[in-house]
Image (cartoon, rainbow, N blue to C red):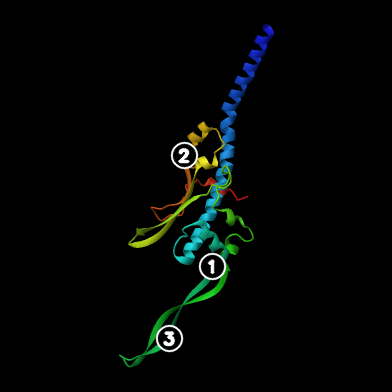
């Protein structure tokens, strides 16, 4: 009987010791996993933003979907131009004399493929629509575009995002729920990781500067 009691107490001690360890170490491990995964997500959102900004520069608006974005990377070009002032003389019938006409001339200096400019030989753009560390690797970022009025003009805007749940699907639920309601200047606040805005002219992300200081792997 005494032996049984000793075994039970020994098992209980191990159990409670493990629980104490988890209560201390769990949040630490969660933070490491979270930061690694969030960094990968932020890097992907930056790629999406870079391609969207290039697309808007070339076409005047953001691409409506990822198929259009990938196609733009593979086939689009940057035109390096130079604008200069010039003038010429033209006969004016009303005045009966030659008058100087001022014009602006735009010269195309070179053409650079978008793919070479943004990604070099890296083909990660082919998977930029997929959320890193999602459960099956196939969850896609939600991306939308819209046109809003700003200063009396119609302006193209876009937004790409993913829920934190998608990235932290296999992490402790209590820590994940706590993460979704964070409010700190050093953290990604809210339950989503976002770049862009559908209600304002912005291509900023909702992550803190620490995620911009880390280099892509």
Q: Which mark is residue 5?
A: none
Q: Nearer the viewer, residue 191 or 205?
A: 191
The residue beneath circle 1 is 78
Q: Secondary structure at mark 3?
A: strand
Q: Find residue 14 and report its horizontal and vertical position in percent.
A: 64, 19
Q: Is residue 30 above or below residue 151?
A: above
* Neighbours of disc 2 within 10 Å: few (<14), some (14-19), many (20+): few
Q: For the residue labelled by badge 2, is the local secondary structure a helix, a strand or a loop?
A: loop
In the image, is residue 43 above or below residue 177? below
Q: CA distance from mark 2 to mark 1?
A: 39 Å
Total numbered circles? 3
Residue placed at 56% from the left, 71% from the top?
111
Query: In the drawing, does residue 133 fall left or right of residue 90?
Result: right
Residue extending farthest right = 3
Q: Residue at x 54, y 47 (%)?
A: 139
Q: Residues within 10 Å of mark 3 (few under 14, many from 20)?
A: few
**Lower sequence index among marks 2 and 1:** 1
Q: Which comes sooner in the sequence, label 3 or label 1? A: 1
Image quarter in which the N terminus is found: top right
Give the label, 2 or 1, closer to the camera: 1
Q: Earlier in the sequence, mark 2 or mark 3?
A: 3
Q: Secondary structure at mark 1?
A: strand
Q: CA distance from mark 3 to mark 1?
A: 30 Å
x, y percent for residue 10: 66, 15
The residue pinned by badge 2 equals 184
Q: Residue furthest top?
A: 1
Expressed as whole percent of the image width and height from the top left, the position of residue 105 reads: 46, 78
Q: CA distance from mark 2 to mark 3?
A: 61 Å
Residue ID for mark 3 = 88
């Amino acid at each position: 009987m005494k032996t049984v009691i000793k075994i039970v107490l020994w098992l209980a001690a191990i159990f409670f010791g493990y629980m104490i360890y988890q209560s201390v170490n769990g949040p630490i491990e969660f933070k490491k996993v979270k930061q690694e995964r969030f960094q990968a997500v932020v890097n992907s959102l930056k790629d999406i933003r870079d391609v969207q900004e290039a697309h808007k520069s070339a076409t005047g608006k953001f691409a409506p979907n990822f198929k259009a974005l990938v196609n733009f990377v593979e086939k689009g070009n940057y035109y390096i131009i130079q604008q200069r002032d010039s003038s010429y003389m033209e006969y004016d019938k009303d005045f009966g004399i030659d008058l100087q006409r001022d014009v602006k001339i735009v010269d195309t200096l070179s053409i650079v493929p978008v793919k070479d400019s943004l990604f070099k030989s890296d083909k990660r753009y082919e998977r930029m629509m997929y959320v890193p560390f999602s459960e099956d690797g196939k969850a896609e970022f939600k991306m939308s575009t819209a046109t809003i009025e700003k200063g009396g003009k119609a302006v193209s805007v876009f937004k790409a995002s993913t829920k934190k749940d998608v990235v932290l699907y296999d992490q402790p639920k209590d820590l994940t729920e706590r993460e979704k309601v964070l409010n700190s200047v050093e953290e990604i606040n809210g339950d989503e990781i976002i770049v862009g805005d559908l209600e304002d002219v912005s291509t900023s992300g909702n992550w803190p500067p620490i995620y911009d200081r880390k280099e892509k792997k």
